[in-house]
Every structure is written in C-alpha cells, then in structure tokens.
Image (cartoon, rainbow, N blue to C red):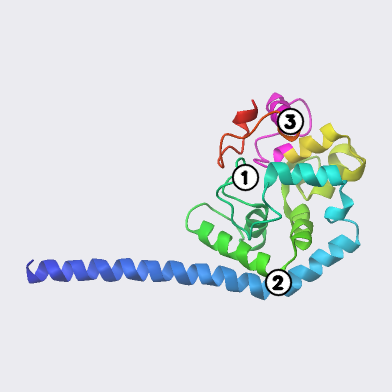
C-alpha cells in the first residue's frame, strides 16, 4: 500500500476509534447521571407511594396486567430485555428514563443513553420506586384538559375515579394506549383501541402469545 493510502487508512481508523470512544463516554454519562439523580428520584417515588399514587394503589390484578403487557420480565431484568415475547426493546425502566433524562427524546444514538440511564436507575431504585415514577410520568394521550400524564391523572379524567375502582375493561383501555398514546383515543369511539383491548384480554387470559420480542402490538393475539 502506498504512503498516501496508509495515511488515509490511519485517519479512518482514528476516526472510527474516536467515534466509538465518544459513544462509550456518552453511555457512561447516562449511567452516571442516573446515579446522580437517584436520591432525588427515590425521595419523589417515596412521596408518591405515601400519597397513594404508587403501585400499591393499584389492585394486584391491575398491576399484573400492566406488567404483562408493558414489560413481562420487569421483576427480573436490570433495565434491558431483548428476549421476552411482547416486551419490545423498551422496558418500563427505559420508558421512564425517556421522560426523566431527555427534554425531547428522539430515536437513534440517544437510545444508548436511555439504556444506560435505565441501568443506573435499576442500580439505585427499587422496582416499587421505579413503578411509582413510571405511573406518574407515562403519557396517556390527549384528554379534555390537554395531554394526560400519569395513570392516576388519566383515570380521573377519563373515568372520574382512581384505578382501583375501575372495571377490568376500563383499566385495560388505559393500559392499551401506552404503546402509542398519540395513536389511540380514550374519549369517543375508537375501533383500533377496541381491537387492542381485545388482544390484551386474550393475552392475560392465556389464550395467545406474542410472536416475538418485537410484537408489542400483539399481532400474535389478533
């Protein structure tokens, strides 16, 4: 190889190594930021639980159904799950991270920070605390007072009562929109939402299984 060719190759290698190093630093910063934020988030989660807005404020069945649909291996993973059927690539902890660690999340390289921030949360917060924050942060689409944020807010605005007093169908309609809140409509007729609720009902009854990790729309339960 000529000297100019070797020089170009060396520049390319350095550029690749530099990019990889930058990604590693970016990932490490996500984890470090989660550790930094953990004391404040733990305190907030504990307040939510004390105020009756944590996972204990759901019925045992509601909590099981939420986990089954959103993140089946939630109790066992450490923020990442790329294997469980129906889980998708975004765990509950990663979904929470998207709302806590980004002013405006966009797919791409930011997914790396989302993952490492989630891993940091898992290292410092209990599963119960993570769920309390998730229930407070997760979006449920547009409501009569604007964008609905949090399960307890959505339950009050849509049904006029807390989750613990909802029927199974009412609760599953809330759970159903979480996959894409902007797509479904909790107010008024929505046949697409009705179909998703039907699939979730089949899933939790054990009558079907997702087709793989990426089957978040539950096509295996159609």
98 in relation to 166, above or below: below
For marks 2 and 1, the one nearer the N-term is 2
For marks 1 and 3, the one nearer the N-term is 1
Q: Is residue 140 visible?
A: no
Is residue 91 left or right of 175 when viewed as pictured? left
Point out which mark residue 87 bears.
Answer: 1
143 in relation to 92, above or below: above
Query: Closer to the observer: label 1 or label 3?
Result: 1
Q: Choose between 11 and 77: the one closer to the eye.
A: 77
Which quadrant of the rendered structure holds the C terminus?
Answer: top right
User: Percent x, y for residue 154?
Assistant: 81, 44
Point out which mark residue 151 bears.
Answer: none
Q: Choose between 67 and 175: the one closer to the eye.
A: 67
Give neighbour class at mark 2: few <14, some 14-19, many 20+ (Cα, 10 Å): some
Q: Which residues are magenta?
A: 176-200
Which residue carries the number 3 mark? Answer: 197
Report if residue 188 lies within the magenta region. yes
């Amino acid at each position: 190889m000529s000297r100019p060719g070797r020089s170009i190759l060396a520049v390319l290698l350095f550029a690749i190594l530099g990019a990889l190093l930058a990604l590693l630093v970016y990932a490490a910063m996500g984890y470090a930021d989660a550790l930094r934020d953990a004391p404040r988030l733990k305190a907030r989660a504990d307040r939510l639980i004390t105020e009756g807005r944590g996972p204990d404020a759901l019925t045992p069945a509601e909590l099981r159904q939420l986990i089954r649909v959103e993140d089946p291996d939630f109790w066992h993973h450490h923020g990442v799950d790329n294997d469980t059927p129906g889980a998708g690539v975004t765990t509950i902890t990663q979904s929470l991270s998207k709302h806590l660690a980004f002013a405006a999340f966009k797919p791409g390289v930011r997914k790396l920070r989302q993952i490492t921030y989630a891993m940091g949360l898992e290292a410092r917060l209990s599963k119960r605390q993570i769920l309390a924050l998730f229930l407070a942060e997760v979006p449920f689409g547009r409501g009569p007072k604007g964008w609905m944020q949090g399960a307890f807010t959505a339950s009050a605005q849509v049904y006029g009562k807390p989750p613990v007093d909802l029927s199974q169908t009412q609760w599953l309609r809330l759970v159903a929109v979480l996959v894409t809140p902007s797509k479904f409509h909790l107010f008024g007729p929505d046949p697409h939402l009705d179909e998703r609720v039907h699939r979730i009902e089949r899933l939790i009854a054990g009558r079907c299984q997702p087709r793989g990790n990426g089957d978040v729309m539950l096509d295996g339960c159609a």
